[in-house]
Amino acid sequence: MAWVRYSLWRSPCHDHRTTWSNGRYGAPPVPEIRSRDVACLAVVCARISNMRPEILFSTFAPVSGLPGVGPRIAKLIEKVAGPRLVDLYWHLPTQIVDRRYSPSLARAPDGAIVTVTVVVERHTPAPGKRLPYKVFCSDGSGQLTLVFFHAKPDYLQRALPVGEERVVSGRIRHYGDEVQITHPDHIGTAAELDALKAVEPVYRLTAGLTARPLQRAVRLTLDQAPDLPEWLEPQFVSGRRWQGWKDALLAAHAPESPDDLEPGNPARERLAYDELLANQLALALVRESVRRGAGRAVSGDSSLRKQVVASLPYSLTSAQERALEEIWKDMASPARMLRLLQGDVGSGKTIVAFLAMLNAVESGAQAALMAPTEVLAQQHGDVLTPLCAELGIRLALLTGREKGKFRRETLADLEAGDIDILVGTHAIFQEGVAFSDLAFAVIDEQHRFGVHQRLALTAKAAGARANLLVMTATPIPRTLTMTAYGDMDVSQLDEKPPGRIPVDTRAMPLERLDEVVQAVRRAVGDGDRVYWVCPLVEESDVIDIAAAEARYAALAGNLGNDVALLHGRMKSAEKDAHMSRFAGGEISVLVATTVIEVGVDVPEATVMVVEHAERFGLAQLHQLRGRVGRGDRQGRCLLLYAAPLGDTARARIRIMRETDDGFRIAEEDLRLRGAGEVLGTRQSGLPDFRLADVGAHEELMLAARDDAKLVLERDPDLSSDRGQALRALLYLFERDAAVGYLRSG
Ligand code: ADP
Ligand code: MG
């Protein structure tokens, strides 16, 4: 099952563990298909028809096949870079060691890394177990002592024969009058001087893996890298002063100065562009394929919509009205709609989705709304059911939990067309679920689904000829949207409903927990309702839950029956019961893991306590805070952190205190993540690029989008020479499933 773990490790979202393991989409993926964006589509649609080009076979061979790389080293390399040669291509150096400095020993400064030619004078074996073996050398200007602990005398006598000239490279240390190098990095013959006097790439390592075997594996890998036909326009490459792919790859692994490690280095830019182009091309192919499929024009008579708008206790914001106009216009057109509705937490996406669905219902067809969690599906059901009852239309709920007769009846009614709106989790696009006439589908909070699942769902909805609206609360910058969705139509809710009071946000060290508990007690006494969120521990929801349970027990000890617990492993019925008791005011404190992050709407909730706030990404903190301050009472958010705070966590908390503007938060998040923080990426469902730096390579991203568009306009089947080369690019970056979307596969 190694590959299963592997694909999870690479995937930007952990939510779909079950998707693979229970084989919902049929057979599990074969190990060769590991594309991050579109792999799942290959399985869903089984349309992949092209084999990987032969020229790339060796590229995807396992690292363990390299000469001299044993299973132990291969495992470590897999851990730090990945299991295949191609993973080593993308494992670019993070630093350099400059070994070009060759001073005379008399002038070699303390601390410098030098490469010097010396004559070996004598060996003094270690006088005791803890004491070092020493080799004394000189270069005419001065003496050098080479120091070895736990030495193998045989080896040293062979490597450093007395009376001979040798080249050694390492860091100089002065101890009194003695000039030393302890454990030189390199020992070679005089003939090897030039090779050793080089700038050496330094790669990210992992515990147990040292620099040498990894460097060696990378070198062997690059020696075997194939020459691939150029997939970029020659003028474009020369205009940017780039090299061909292979030369760029070699150059990126042979940095000569610290500048060469920056994202602006031409070799790195070229590789990043290739990755972005593969991403854009894959997304464009999927999108074109969706669009190409028959669409349908949907336009109702406004009767239901008018009734709902008139009955709302508020009027729509102009952003909501604008979005609705755009959506209705898309629906009315015979081309298939594929639109993204972006709006910060609390901007009122649900009502927009509902009014759009009513348009379909008015025209006599069905609509579906899919949420990422049962809690959220249930909540949508609770909010929309009374509205539907008023209109005399029928809404049904379908999640993983409805079983037996009730489920069968729901499915039968759906197929008979007796259900107008189906609300649920991804269960609504499962096998055995057939609509009578699905014209419009909405996917809510879709950033939570992860890239694989999202594209699978898109394909499923598209298969039903439905117009598609996807909604996300991640107010990510436009360029980032493009990496995840391609060049999709976007409507934005850039305006919040009026009258919202900004949430009062404070940060406090965990040592002051007692005070916080007292404050919660007082708040509950004042009739407030409180969320208490316990931290997310990566890779382990068991630990999460244990932490939440412990906190629950402690708070219940203090506050009694007023507290309930909510976490992802609880039975659905239990979750619902707690959620509705909290919404109804029967309990005042809800201790939860991040299951509540998504979309939960209890307007009476006013206090949000986030425990171990330093472990959350900015976007996530913003989402959590968005759960309070929805009604007319002042919302409060308490970020409890474990001191001392790291720089990134400190910056996040500062930003949370400074602003509640989702866009600014998203941009800051990106900036902070640029500094190597990946947690946020995982949770926002963005693809995790290995070469492109979405912050630094924005301009490349735009160019790649235009390039992909132009390519498909001119050569939709990728059949020209350049098209063929681009297919290889898709394989190289494991976007190969997209090849199955070509008109003539
Ligand atoms: P989100 O965009 O986060 O999904 P919701 O759709 O849950 O936001 O809306 C948040 C809250 O705002 C809901 O309680 C909803 O009734 C309310 N709301 C939506 N639109 C408006 C509006 N135009 N004016 C006032 N309140 C609104
Ligand atoms: Mg919502």
Image (tube, grey):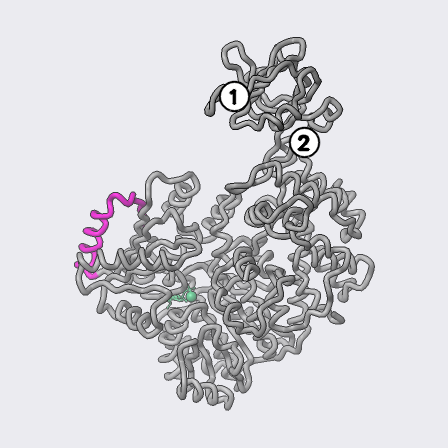
Residue 455: give x, y in percent of width and height: 58, 67
Q: What residue did someone put label 1 on?
A: 126
Identify the magenta region: 505-527
* Residue 198 in sight: yes
Looking at numbered disc 1 in the image, what kind of residue is underneath it?
Ala
Task: Sort mark 2 into few (<14), some (14-19) or many (20+) by Cα contacts within 10 Å.
Answer: some
Q: Answer with the quarter of the image where residue 55 lies.
A: bottom right
Q: What residue did someone put label 2 on?
A: 256
Q: Nearer the viewer, mark 1 or mark 2?
A: 1
Q: Which mark is residue 551?
A: none
Residue drawn at (82%, 61%), measured in percent from left and top?
720
- The quarter of the image that holds ligand 1 is bottom left
Above or below, 410 against 603 in this view is below
Q: Nearer the viewer, residue 442 or 456?
A: 456
**Quadrant of the image for the N terminus?**
bottom right
Q: Is residue 511 magenta?
A: yes
Q: Nearer the viewer, residue 298 or 385?
A: 385
Report the side of 479 relative to 402 (left or right): right
Residue 713: give x, y in percent of width and height: 75, 63
Residue at disc 2, secondary structure: loop
Above or below, 527 against 291 in this view is above
Majority SS type along the magenta span:
helix
Q: Nearer the viewer, residue 209 or 495?
A: 209
Residue drawn at (58%, 20%), measured in percent from left and top?
146
Say whether marks 1 and 2 touch (CB < 8 Å). Answer: no
Residue 265: give x, y in percent of width and height: 67, 38
Above or below, 663 against 128 in this view is below
